Image (cartoon, rainbow, N blue to C red):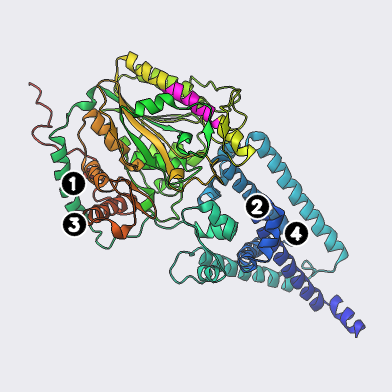
Amino acid sequence: MSEVVTRWLRSPGGVLAVTLLGTLLVTVLVAFAGNLALDLFHRNAEPPEVARRLTVERELFFLSSTVFWLVVVLVVAVLGRLWLSVGVVVVLTGLIGFADQRKQELVMEPLYPSDLTLGADLSFLSQMVGAGVLVAAALGALLVLACAVLVGRFLGRHFPRPRLRTRPRLAWGFLAGRVVLAVATVSSLLYVMQFHTPGNSVRAAYEASGAHWRPWNQSKNYTDNGLVAGLLYNLPMPAMPRPHRYSEATMQRLVEKYSAAAAKINKHRDTWAFEDVNVVAVLSESFSDPTRFKRVQLAEDPIPFTRELMGRTTSGNVLTSKYGGGTANTEFEVLTGMSTSQFRPQMTTPYQMLVPQHSDFPSAVRFFESRGLTTTAMHSYTSALYRRPLVYDLMGFDEVVFEDEMSHRAAVDNSPFISDKATFQEVVSRLRAAEKPTFMNVVTMQNHYPAAGKYADPIPSTGMPSKAGERNLEHFARGLRHSDLAMEEFLRSLRASGEKTVVVFYGDHLPPIWGGTGMSRRMKHETPFFVYTNFKKPEPEQRPTTSPVFLMNHVLQAANAPVSPYYALLEKLEREMPAMAHDHYTSPQNENLPWIYLPTPARRLLNDYRLVMYDLAEGKSFSERAMFKVPESPETRPPLLPD
């Protein structure tokens, strides 16, 4: 019997069968190992997670491994070399895992499918990881591929395999098989990518296997379900579902409705308010008030000036969409007036997933340009993150400034980031040099996480649950104090400049140092804001928790400037529901309310808002031009010039 088996194994048919079976076995093992490696990359390779993935979550793990296997088979079918394909898959797995880890370190978010498109941008990669790491990665990839080729040659010499060169018909059969396999796997992967299509069997299989989606906590979404499942859940889809009443006629009615509302507001506004007034919007990285959390104590108040200023201006807290990261989303909300809470959860980063789909994108930038202001975007860090150069261009900024274009780039102590003081010095110098009033959107970086080790004199604290958390808090608090002093100096410089300026200041999110402290979910999403003017005495107004989308309305109010229909809609909406989150709304009394408990006027306004958002973000832009244009009236038209 053994002789028969031996002869068969050495026969052409036996060699072919063993080759195909061996290829199947290798691809399956590579898929399982690759999927496990991705999860360990995401979870920082903690040993308990290995057992958990292979036991408690085995159904999810096997399902994701099957999806991974389709990719492996496609690579084998395209390249036609098993071990070279294994090398390619190993390299891609390592790159994706490293990218996921790096993104979590930088912005506290996992890797999204939209991020994978940036992998071919060498300048982006160089800025993110450094040229040295990029070169090392390239050399490592070449080494892995070389080893894979050598392994293939070694095994080819010691194990029988089909000789295609001497058997043309078999060679053509192999080629035909590769084509069929490639078509089959591509078709399967295209179906997998229709993950959000109603009735998709792959999504149904995931949910039957125990997947629990966490739409508004993507890090947990990936951690609980696996990196492959997280990527599938975040595959692109329309930002919003089409409202059932959406049409050109509906949008025309809304334009007329809110044009009338704008005209009513503008009766008491100064048409020429921006003839000699600058506007500066400051997004302060991680700026928040740690003293609100009473379980921890700091040896000194890190933001005494900001606290005092908020007591005599329009101020309060903004409700940010994310905790520990999501800077670009808060900035998006402020500039566009579009709340990410109204988007589908898969619209994780509008700067990468939504704005680039447009030839231009409606925002406050175009509005201020229509009022005669020049517009500048300033970000005191790299241009690589969130596709900001493209986004700023599509929003219509006249000038874009990143760290390399800044004249003031000093840092504090051991911080690797440009200080708030230097950033504000840059703002003041550019405002003074400008020939016309300017709208300037400023993003600071001084307080970016991690905080530990930045400063020579951290503020002592008590009450944090761990030494690492305590150290991060103490250095973060010292950074806040530097920011507070920088803001005091900045406003002093604006007062001395003689140029009228409105400043809206807000924090983008809390730093990710509060895990395990028991801080409430809502508090983790609230950061301070204020609106300040240097040309009139401010009227103190303590606002309930406010969404970032409403901040530009407070700028227009502070400048006594007229509003467009879009900002009239936002003004009316804020009166009914000052803040919006994915699962609740905030009432004027600062209470959290689900949709069903909103008053009827609030629900009607929210329906109008969703229609306008859909029209601007996903629809036909029927209302865009009129919504951002201040309605003219006899009182607002400029006087005729003499002949």
Numbered badge on residue 570: none
Q: Disc 2 to disc 1, how far (Cα)?
A: 52 Å
Q: Is residue 540 left or right of residue 176?
A: left
Q: In front here: 455 or 380?
A: 455
Instruction: Provide the residue designation for mark 3.
Output: 249
Q: CB atoms at circles 2 and 1 under 8 Å apart? A: no
**Which secondary structure is most common in the magenta stretch?**
helix
With respect to residue 5, does 468 lie above or below? above
Mark before the other along the chain sequence, 4 or 1: 4
- Mark toward the viewer: 4 or 1: 1
Q: Secondary structure at mark 4?
A: helix
Q: Nearer the viewer, residue 407 or 183?
A: 407
Residue identifier under label 4: 83
**Residue placed at 69% from the left, 42% from the top?**
137
Disc 2 crowd rating (10 Å Cα; few below 14, some 14-19, many 20+) is: some
Residue in front for this viewpoint, 60 or 514 = 514
What residue does disc 1 label?
258
* Residue 479 is covered by the magenta coloring: yes
Secondary element at image label 2:
helix
How far is disc 3 from disc 1 in space, using C-alphas? 14 Å
- The quadrant of the picture occupied by the C terminus is top left
Which tag, 3 or 4, sits closer to the chain's start?
4
Q: Residues within 10 Å of mark 3 (few under 14, many from 20)?
A: few
Q: Of circles 2 and 1, which is in front?
A: 1
Residue at the extreme right of the image, as rendered: 3
User: At which x and y percent is residue 125?
Assistant: 59, 40
Which disc number belongs to residue 92?
2
Magenta span: 476-487
Q: Amino acid at mark 1?
A: Tyr
Give how far across and how far down residue 83 sits, in percent.
Answer: 75, 59
Residue 347 falls within the magenta-colored stretch: no
